[in-house]
Amino acid sequence: MEAKGTKRVFIAFNLPGEVREKIGSLIDRLSSRTDAARWVRPETVHLTLHFLGSLGGGEIEWVKAGMAAESGSVGGIKFVFDRPSAFPNIRRPRVIVIGGREIGGTRAVDFQRRLGNELRRIGLEIDSRPWAPHLTLGRARERKAAEFPDFEPIEFGVTTFELMESLLTPGGADYQLLSGFRL
């Protein structure tokens, strides 16, 4: 439960609707193979840039200002997601994902790093591990090897990044847009 007056927030690239449909199809195929995972709802899949945790209203305004400082610095970014994976590993997964990468450059990694530096500048603690673009498909109920069906690579582009609130519910997390910015 969040402290009164705080919101659980993160910064992400939200996905186009047609991409969420493809991910939904993949999740359907995965869930028909096993019930060893709690699969996410396709409409909630996103590409996280930074998880910020519980922040108060003033801190959220600082984050928005930091995001605004980076707005317009990139343009668009294209990604491909084509690597079945899991955290901590595919043999004993906790989180089932598909890994991806930017097509034709490092603007996404550079942008994520610059944004992190801006968030640190305003006093937030940011995960210092290298960013690994991935889309979460489910959370394992059992720690046994994840088996993926064959799937077509999922390609998409983004032109915005968003500040999102995570609302934890018994049925899983719901996400609410707090603010959006152009890349």
Image (cartoon, rainbow, N blue to C red):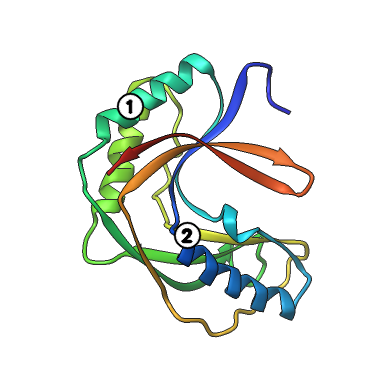
Q: Which amino acid, mark 2?
A: His
Q: Quadrant of the C terminus?
A: top left
Residue 176's image quarter? top right
Q: Which residue is mark 2?
A: 134
Where in the figure is residue 181, as x and y percent of width and height?
33, 37
What residue is drawn where x is 26% and y is 28%? 69
Q: Earlier in the sequence, mark 1 or mark 2?
A: 1
Q: Which amino acid, mark 1?
A: Gly
Residue 124's image quarter? top left
Residue 120's image quarter? top left
In this picture, residue 115 sits left or right of residue 9: left
What residue is drawn where x is 59% and y is 74%? 25
Residue 145 visible in the picture: no
Q: Which residue is mark 1?
A: 66
Q: Quadrant of the N terminus?
A: top right
In this picture, residue 158 sits left or right of residue 84: left
Residue 41 drawn above or below residue 59: below
Residue 104 drawn above or below residue 132: below
What residue is drawn where x is 37% and y is 28%? 119
In this picture, residue 79 sits left or right of residue 178: left
SS for dot 1 = helix
Residue 142 drawn above or below residue 51: below
Where in the figure is residue 62, as x and y percent of width and height?
39, 20
What residue is drawn where x is 65% and y is 58%? 41
- As drawn, the residue found furthest toward the bottom would be 150
Gap in angstroms between the C-alphas marked 1 and 2: 24 Å
Residue 72 drawn above or below residue 20: above
Where in the figure is residue 142, as x and y percent of width and height?
77, 65
Q: Report the front residue among 90 and 1.
A: 1
Q: Residues within 10 Å of mark 1 (few under 14, many from 20)?
A: some
SS for dot 2 = strand
Q: Are marks 1 and 2 in contact (CB under 8 Å)?
A: no
